[in-house]
Amino acid sequence: MAAQNGGTTNGGTRWIGTRPVRPDGVDKVTGRARFGADLHLPNMLVGKVLRSPHAHARIRSIDTSAALALPGVKAIVTRDDFDDLPSEFVPAGEMLINYRDVVRNVMAREKALFEGHPLAAVAATSEKVAKEALDLIRVDYEVLPHVLDIDEAIAPDAPLLHEDMITAGVEPPPSAPSNVAKVVEFAHGDVEAGFAEADVVVEREFSTQPVHQGYIEPHSCVASFAEDGQAELWCTTQGHFVVRGHCAKLLGMEVSKLRVTASEIGGGFGGKTVVYLEPLALALSRKSGHPVKMTMSREEVFRASGPAPGTWARVRVGVTKDGRITAGEAELKYQAGAFQGSPVQPGCMCAFAPYDLEHVKVTGYDVVVNRPKVAAYRAPGAPQSEYAVESIIDELAKRIGMDPVELRLKNAAREGTRAAYGPTFGPIGLVETLEAARSHEHYRAPLAPGRGRGVASGFWFNIGGETCATLNLGEDGTIALVAGTPDIGGSRAALCLQTAEALGVDVEKIRPLIGDTSTLGYTFLTGGSRTAFASGLAVIEASKDMIGQLCERAAKIWNIPVDAVEWADGEARPAGANAGEFDPLTLADLAGVAGKTGGPIVGRAQINAQGAGPSFGTHLVDVDVDRETGRVTIERYTVIQDAGKAVHPSYVEGQLQGGAVQGIGWALNEEYVYDEYGRLQNPGFLDYRIPVCSDVPMIDTVIVEVANPTHPYGVRGVGETPIVPPMAAIANAVEGALGIRFTDLPMSPPRVLKALEEAHIPEAAD
Amino acid sequence: MARAHVITTVNGDPVEFLCDTEQTLLDVLRDELHLTGSKEGCASGDCGACSVIVDGRLVCACLMLGVEAQGHSIETIEGMAGGDRLHPLQTKFLEHAALQCGVCTPGFLVAAKSLLERNPDPTETEVRYWLAGNLCRCTGYDKIVRAVLDAAQEMRGG
Ligand code: FES
Ligand code: FES
C-alpha cells in the first residue's frame, strides 16, 4: 500500500479554511446558472394543477371531459392515473414518509385534506390554455368539517382526517381512530425525584405558528417521457436520487429508466426534500408524449408545500439555588399537516440536548390537521422545542439570580454526557460556544436604556448517509469532480477544497459538477447538514483511491515497488533513500502518460458516512421595542457556533447568518393566517413577511472549532443549528426589555402591543 | 387573439418579439427571449428577483407588461458584465460570498447597480433600504450589504 499523507504540509492544512471564489460563482452572478424554471425544451407543454378550495371534502367525482375537449389540451391526470400504494415508510430528509400518504399528497384520492390539495393536473400548449382547462374541470365535493389547530384536532368529537388512523406508540392501542398519529417518549432517570431536589421549578406552556421555508425559487420541473418508457426529469431538489425513488414508485417504473438531473437550486432549507409536481409532470408527459414543464406560483408554494409545523409545548424544569438543573420534562404536540409525520420525534430528542440531565422525560404527539403536510425546515422540530426549553432556562437563571450563560455552562452537555435522547456525546463544542459568548465584547457591552439582551443555545444532530463521488483525471492533470448532493449554498466549493487538500493540488485545478442519477451510485439528499461532511468524506476517499492509482503508475515508470512510492504535496516521490533517485512526478506528469501506463485514472468512492458530529451554537441578541407600535427591532446579533472545522469560512459564516435571520423572521413576524373555512389568507410575500434587508443589522459570527474525530479535517455539519437559538434568544431579550415573557410566537407588533396593554390591566383595575 | 409586435432594446441591442397582451415583461424575457437570468420568485412585485432597469429606472419585470417595452430600453442581468469583464458588483459579490443559492443574486445585482448609478456613496442604511425590495432567504443580507458597500468604494476609485 502506498504511503499517503493526505497532501498536507507540516500537519497544517493548505486549502481547508481558505476562501477562494466558489467554482459556480460566475454563472450565478451573470444569470447563466440554470435553475428549475430555466429549462425550455422543444414541443414542451405547460402543466397546471387544479387545487381544492376546501380544507376538507370528500371527492365524489371529477369530470374532465369539457377540459379535455378544449383545443390545446394534451393530457389530464387525476387520482385515476396513480395506483394506490400500500403503507411503507422511507426516509426523506431526517424524517420518514409513507408512500401511501405520498401518493395521496401529490394527488387527492378519497378526500381533499387541505386547501390547495391537488385534484387534477392539465398539460396544454400554453399556460393560458392550461388555466382555461382547469376552469372546465367539474369536481363534485361533499364538504366536511375541518380542523386547523391541535386543540380542535385532539378534541374527543373532532372530525377525522383519516378514519382508520389508530394512534401508534400507545399500549394497549386505542380502540377508536383519532387525529393523533403517534405518541413518542424519551426518558431516563426519575423526573419527580429530580423535581423534589429542585429549589425552583418553572412550568410554562408555549406555542409556535407554522412557518414556511420561504425559498425564493418556487418548485419547478420538466419531465420528458419517451415512447420506450424511459424518462428524464429536470427539477429543483435537494436530492435527485430521492426524487427518482419516489417518482419511480408512484409511476410504477424501474429506477434505471428514470434519469433525474438536479437543476441549480434556489433555496430549499428542507422544503425541497419531497415531491409535489414531479410525479404529475411525469404522468402528464407519459400521457401526452410531450415534455411537460410545471412551476408553482408563489401562492401555490404557500398553500400546498410544506411548512414547519405549528406546535404546542408544556415544559417544566427544576433547578437548585446554586444552579444545578435537577430535572426537565416536556410534552410536545406538533401539527403534521394533512398526513402523519411531523418532526415531533427530533423535537423531543433535541429539547434538552444541550444539558447534562440526570432526570428527563419528553413526550411527543404527532397530530394531523387540515393544513398542507409539513416538510423539513432546517433542524426540523428542534427550533420549537428548544425555544420553549431555552426560555425556561432564562427564567430560571433570573429566579436564582445567576447569569444565564453561567447557568448553561454549569449544566452544559460535554464529551461523555449521556444525551437526553440516549447516546453519549463524543467531542462537542457547546461549552466552547458558551465561553466564547461570555467573553465576547457583545455580552459585556453596555445596554442602552429600554433595550434587552437575550442569550440562547441550540443543538442539532447532523447526519451522514449514503454518498458517492467520482474524480475524473483529465489528460492535463486537471480534475472533474462529480458529486451527488445538490449544491444549495456553496458546497461545491467545500468539496473542491477538501479534494485539493487530500490530493495536494491547487483548488483551481478541480471543476465540480453535480452528476445526474445515472452518473453516480445512490446518493442521499442534501439535508441534515450532511453535504460538507458526507460528500466531503466521499471526495477524500475518492482522492485516496486516485492517489493509490497514481502511486502505482509512478512505481511502474520508475520500475520500483509501489510501496516504495509516496504521495506528498501533489506529487509522487520515492519514499526514502532506499527507493532510489527519481525526480518527482506531478499529477499533470502522470495524467499525461496515463494512456501508456495503464489507462484512464478515476478516483471513486461509495460510502455510508457515519459519525456526523453534532453541532451546538449560542446566540446573543440585543433588541429595542417600540412601545407605541409594538415593533421589535434587532439592534445587534452575534452567532457563535461549533463548525468542527470551517472548510470555507465565508460560507460557514453565511450559514450562521442566514439561519439567524430566518429565526428572526420566525420569532417576530412569520405566521399563517387562515379564515373560518380553512383557507389561507396570506399566501404571498407581502402578507407573509420574511425579513428584508432593512429589518436586520449585520450578523456577527464566531466560528468555534472542536474537531469532529470521524472526519480527517474535523468537519461537522453547520447549516441547521443556527436556526435553533434565535426564537428563545429574542424572547429572552424582549423579556429583558419589557419584563414580559412571550410564550407564543411570533412576537409580531399586534401581539406585543396587546401584551403591553394587558401588562397595564392590573394597574387599571386597582 | 393576435399577438402584439413589440420593438424594443434589450442590453443595448435592438430586439423584436411577439407576445400575448397579458404576458408580463418577465414572461417575455424568460419565455420568448430565453433570457432566464431574471427570476420569478413571486410575480407580485414582492421579491425583486425579476429586477430589471427600464430607461434607467429599477422595475420589477413581473409588474410590467411585455407590450409596455415598446420603444424603451431594458437592461437585464445578462447585460451587466462587459464582454469578458465582470461588473465590480459581480466581482464583489463573489469575493464576499454574498450568495448562497444564488437565485436572488441577479435581482440584487441589478438593484444595487441602479442604486450606485444614483448614489455612488451610499451609507449602510441607504443600501439596506434600497435593497429592501429584494428578498434573500439564504444569506441574512450581511455579506450582500458588505459587497455593495465595497463595490461602491471601488467604483469611486477608493
Ligand atoms: S417576481 Fe417580480 S418581484 Fe417577485
Ligand atoms: S442566496 Fe438564496 S435567496 Fe439569496
Image (tube, rainbow, N blue to C red):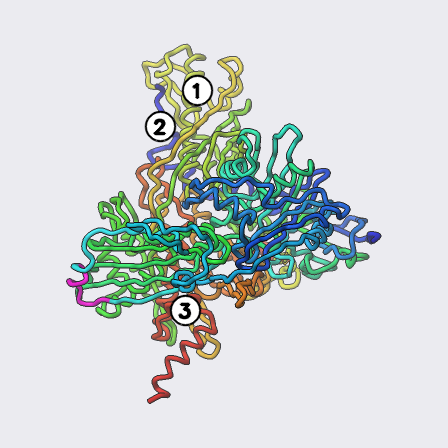
Label disc, if present, on residue A597 of the rendered structure: none
Q: Which residue is mark 3?
A: A623
Magenta segment:
A194-201
**Which of the chains bears the disc numbered 1?**
A
Mark 1, ligand 2, within 8 Å: the answer is: no
- Looking at the picture, tell me which residue is in the foreground, A591 or A250: A250
Q: Residue B138: image x %, image y %? A: 50, 53
Q: Which residue is outermost to the top? A: A559
Q: Quadrant of residue A310?
A: bottom left
A401 in magenta = no
Which of the two labelled residues, at mark 1 and mark 3, occupies the earlier sequence position? Answer: 1
Horizontal arrangement in the rendering, residue A39 relative to residue A106 (left or right)? right
Q: Is label 3 or label 2 in front?
A: 3
Residue behind mark 2:
A5
- Tell me the distance, in whole angstroms, between the alpha carbons under discs 1 and 2: 15 Å
**Residue A140 visible from this viewpoint:** yes
**Quarter-wise, where is residue A123 in the image?**
top right
Q: Earlier in the sequence, mark 3 or mark 2?
A: 2
Q: Are marks 3 and 2 in contact (CB under 8 Å)?
A: no
